[in-house]
Image: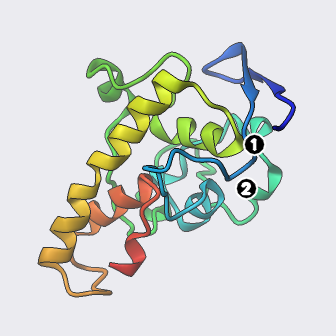
Amino acid sequence: MRKPRIVVVNDLMQKNYRYFLTAPVGRDFDPRFRPELTPAQMLRLGVFGGKYMTDCRAEFPASWFRGARLSTTGKHEASLNYFKVTASQPLAVWRRKGWIHPADPRGWFQWYCRYFQGRRLSEVDETQISRWLAIRRHLAQVRRHCAPGDTACRPRQKQALLHWAYDARRL
C-alpha cells in the first residue's frame, strides 16, 4: 500500500482544495474503467480546443504538458483538436445539467487526471466511470457508419470519444 500523499490545489477554479493520492499512478483502476489514452496522450493529441488545463499545470506532472496542444490565446481553438472540430459543450452547460461535482469543477477530464494520479473518491469515481461507460454508444455508431481510418467520417463524434480517453484514431 502506497503512503497517501496530499495535493493542495490553488488555481482559478479551486482555492486550497486538498485531496489524497492513495493509489499508484496509472494503476489500480476500477476493473470496468479501461481508458485507451492517458491524460498526457490526450493533451498531446489535442482535446478541448487546447483550452483545458491551461491554468492548473502545477497540479500535474510537467511531462504531461511537453508537446501538449494548448491554446496560447486563452480561447477554445478547434484547430488544436485532433480532428480539427469542436466537439464539446461549454462548462456552463455541464453545470446547468448538474454534471459537475464540486471536487472536480472542470468536469470529467479533471476527474480522470486526478484518478490517473491516484486520487480515489468512491462516490465521484462511480459517477464518472458510469459516464465513461455510457460514451461507448458512440463507438458503436462510428463503427457502424464509418470505414476504419476514415478521418472525415463523423469527426465530431470521434473528437468527443478522444475527450473521454477512447482512441478514436483507430476507428
Is label 1 in a helix, a strand or a loop? loop
Q: Quadrant of the N terminus?
A: top right
Q: What residue did someone put label 1 on?
A: 60
Residue drawn at (52%, 62%) of the image: 46
Please indicate whether residue 116 sits to the left or right of residue 91 in the image.
right
Q: Mark 2 or mark 1: which is in front?
A: 1
Where is residue 154 shown, x and y percent of the image? 21, 70
**Label placed on residue 159:** none
Q: How many residues crowd around disc 1 within 10 Å: few (fewer than 14), some, or many (20 or more)?
A: some
The residue identified by callout 2 is: 65
Mark 2 touches mark 1? (CB < 8 Å): yes
Instruction: Please count the marks in the image.
Output: 2
The x and y percentages for residue 136 are 28, 57
Compared with residue 170, is residue 57 higher up or lower down, i.e. above or below?
A: above
Near-viewer residue (46 or 117): 117
Instruction: Determine which quarter of the picture holds residue 147.
Output: bottom left
Location of residue 16 (image quadrant): top right
